[in-house]
Amino acid sequence: MTRWFRSYWAEEDTWFYFEVDADGQVTRQVELQGPLEKPIAAASLAEWEAAQQSGTLADYEVTFGATAEVPVHEWDAHEPQDLAAGEFEAVWLTARATCQARARARSTHGA
């Protein structure tokens, strides 16, 4: 069963949003940082694995980041808050659009 939750890390001033599968593996992850909750990552495990296999992992991580590699039970210390699928999806879509726009801006400006 898929589960969605978020967890706040005060030391990094970052909200982490997770989608995890029945085995506790993070399948999608969003990171929002600072008081304006600026999207800094919106990664998919399946996409990350495909990028790794195709040799484009560095480009993928620059654009979208990466998912957590540790089991989600290790995040429990950060007081996870359960989310509905729609809540996660809304954050995911917004963060993905921001990451993609940032990547387009970098390629346009040659950065």
Image (tube, rainbow, N blue to C red):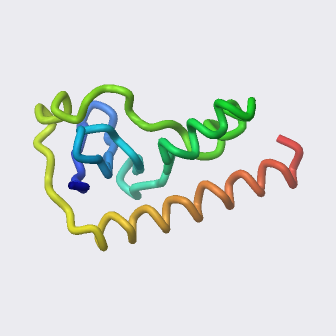
Residue visible at 38% across and 27% down? 69
Instruction: Tell me the quarter of the picture where residue 90 sits.
Output: bottom left
Q: Using the image, determine if residue 97 lies above or below residue 48.
A: below
Instruction: Tell me the quarter of the picture where residue 58 sits.
Output: top right
Q: Quadrant of the C terminus?
A: top right
Q: Is residue 60 left or right of residue 34?
A: right
Residue visible at 28% across and 68% down? 85
Q: Quadrant of the N terminus?
A: bottom left
Residue visible at 54% across and 39% down? 65
Q: Using the image, determine if residue 71 lies above or below residue 100.
A: above
Q: Along the line of sight, which residue is nearer the eye, 78 or 85?
A: 85
Residue visible at 52% across and 45% down? 46
Picture mark count? 0
Q: Is residue 85 left or right of residue 107?
A: left
Instruction: Report x, y in % for residue 5.
Output: 22, 53
Q: Is residue 42 left or right of residue 53?
A: left
Q: Along the line of sight, which residue is nearer the eye, 45 or 94?
A: 45
Instruction: Report x, y in % for residue 17.
Output: 32, 51
Q: Along the line of sight, which residue is nearer the eye, 57 or 2?
A: 2
Instruction: Report x, y in % for residue 71.
Output: 25, 29
